[in-house]
Image (tube, rainbow, N blue to C red):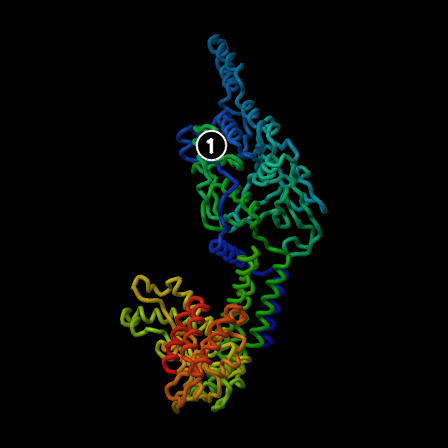
Amino acid sequence: MVITISLTVLMLSLYVLRTWPQIIAPLQNIVFDTYQQIKPRPGGDSAVIVIDVDESSIAKLGQWPWPRTTIATLVDKARDSGALAIGFDMAFSEPDRTSPRRIAKELVSRNSGNTDLAELSRMLAQMPDNDEQFASSIKTMPVVLGFFNGEGKADSGLVKKPGVVWLGEDLTRLLPPQRGVISSLEQLQEAAAGAGAISLSGDRTDEVIREVPLFNAYEGTAWPSLSIELLRLAIENATGEPQSFIIKTSEASGEASGGVAAITEARVANFSFPLTADGKLKLYFARQDTSRVVPAHHVLATSADELRPELEGKILIVGTSASGLRDIRTTALRETVPGVEIHAQIIDQIMQGTFLSRPDWAFGMEWLLLAVTALIIILLVPFMGPAMAAMLGASIVAAVAAISWYAFSRHGLLLDPVFPMAGGLLIYSLTTLMVYASTEREKRYIRNAFGHYLAPDLVARLEAAPDSLSLGGEVRDMTLMFLDIRGFTQISERLTPEELVSFLNALLSPLSEIIQEHEGAIDKYIGDSIMAFWNAPLDVDDHPLKACRAALALIEKVEELNARDSFGFKSKDLPPVAIGVGISTGDGCVGNMGSSRRFDYSVVGDTVNIAARLESATKEVGWPILVSRETHDRSMQLAFLHAGRLNLKGKTGAQEVFALAGDSETASSQEFVRLREAQDQMWQAIENGNTEEAHQLGEACSRLAPGRFQAFLQRLSSSEQSRS
């Protein structure tokens, strides 16, 4: 034990010191990627349309880059079709080579003295400049131009200051710095409403895009990414009110921030979004939606009126998916998508309000999970056999995975299960190895001592809690239940053996779960029947009531399975499945019964026989649940109807029987109260021999009884009147 405790302390210390082997990081990525693949972010209607410079557009319009006049036409079409804003996942950093003035200068410099070319150059120089036309179009609507990291290259600079306001510590100290930028021409920037970073960087190990910086530090201020700047301008256009990014920073001591200032909140208008300490958004991907991608050539060839249904009220992003332009990325869903798709998903994610985050306390939670896991293993494994220890280990792994999955699926939290599971596995292996020799001998003795006396499942229970079972028979106050499938012979004749086994498993499994949920014990399966009991081997409070409630749940479950056609009987022209349930309360002798070589924990006695006979009598009475007088008297808060006195096989004299008709809500309803009173009067008339009055009261009961009660009451009244 000292060695395992030392190993635990060592691993916890390594995790605190951040020296846990780097192999864990790729495993974490695999786990979190798998979570997204199992449960991607919901899709749905998107506010973003991607205008794609795809292969077909290049084939129709020529090699990229296109003339700025063509790009200006895209902007004009976006404006005239009612789009809120348009952004470009690219930078126009050089003048347009196809501009008439540039062509004129080339002609003059290369052909001086040629009067014809000189005249042509003069005419070209008087024509509008392509970049000027593009700038003029940009001024007419909210346009965001892209820029990217230009470290090591000529810095083209940024012109307009972004609308970013921060409260607290200096935001620019937290954000990834931009040493230089490659941006669009100054005249285009002056005309544009905003500029946004378009850089996307994948994970260093596998180039998968998992998080994107939404803000970057440049020249003493914070610059937004293309996606959120587009969102800000779209909101401005839609509301007519200026919008700014509000970012709050504060001192923090979590894992992500390393004990320094961190970003605590980021928002624009009514949209808030969680960021890492250095301004990144963890991406939660939806499946790629190709329906929102519009080829650029389609926009250029279509009138604004025709485009309006597609583009009105939308945020547009122009990007490229053509293979030669090399803007293809890999997402956590293992989809390869153009970079512009990731920008679109960021906007969708923010507008949808569905995020992934790794809070500061995640590190402490993972540390605590390993500590608890180690404590459980160290304290319990030495007292377990290999099978139980393996089950404990599997349970711990499942619990850690379940906690991690629950945090992701319900709250979008990234809790790492790898560290607690890997650490727990090491501790478990070492602990098991050390205690195996001594504990296995003791466990083997227990199994040998009781293997011939108890059934295997009871041996396991005795190992876990040896004081919970009595090894001899004892008389206890118990409630017995028998359940049987109606018309099983007809069903078995119509099904193959494989289909029959599948049917029984599909029916008996959920029914058994219901019994156990109501604290009942499954005694045995007898073909198409179940025998169960309450109040043994452990005490169960109000066991008659719990057995009755279980019976109501059983009937409801069968109706539910029939409604879903879970057994496929409709296609086989078989009637719906029906069951009969008999319940009896009284003394039962419970204990280990069987042969000298094999014992089962079971119960015998008159209470068992009555329950079995009541189940059989449900066919005669025409009601699915019949209970004895004792069960009825101890479950009075439920809805019961008198079912007469029946001659049960093996019993002398008629036994008073009651039909369980519903729960306490049914019992308290005015309709049922009136029905029960009328039926009690009918039985009194029958016992008094007043046939005519009993007949009238029976008809009254039939009128009062809704649905299935009616046939039941008619059958009882006619049967008892004929007897009297």
Residue 107 percent coordinates (x, y): 49, 15
Q: Which residue lies most toward the right here?
A: 168
The answer to whether residue 233 is above or below residue 703 is above
Q: State the SS at label 1.
A: helix
Q: Is residue 385 visible?
A: yes
Of residues 278 and 427, the one drawn nearer to the viewer in this rendering: 278
| Residue 438 visible in the picture | no
Front-most of 8 and 332?
332
Q: Position of residue 549 (x, y in %)?
A: 49, 74
Q: Residue at x 38, y 74 (%)?
A: 715
Identify the residue at image location x=43%, y=88%.
Answer: 606
Quarter of the rendering occupied by the C terminus: bottom left
Q: Nearer the viewer, residue 339 or 648?
A: 648
The residue that disc 1 covers is 307
Q: Residues within 10 Å of mark 1 (few under 14, many from 20)?
A: many
Residue 442 in the image: x percent, y percent? 50, 85
As drawn, 71 above or below 530: above
Q: Residue at x 50, y 56 (%)?
A: 35
Image-based side of 78 in relation to 241, left or right: left
Please determine whether, in this image, residue 615 is positioned above or below residue 152. Answer: below
Mark 1: amino acid: Leu
Residue 463 located left or right of residue 528: right
Quadrant where the N terminus is found in the figure: bottom right
Res 637 quadrant in image: bottom right
The answer to which of 78 and 510 lies nearer the viewer is: 510
> How many callouts does the rendering have?
1
Residue 149 in the image: state x and y as whole percent: 58, 38
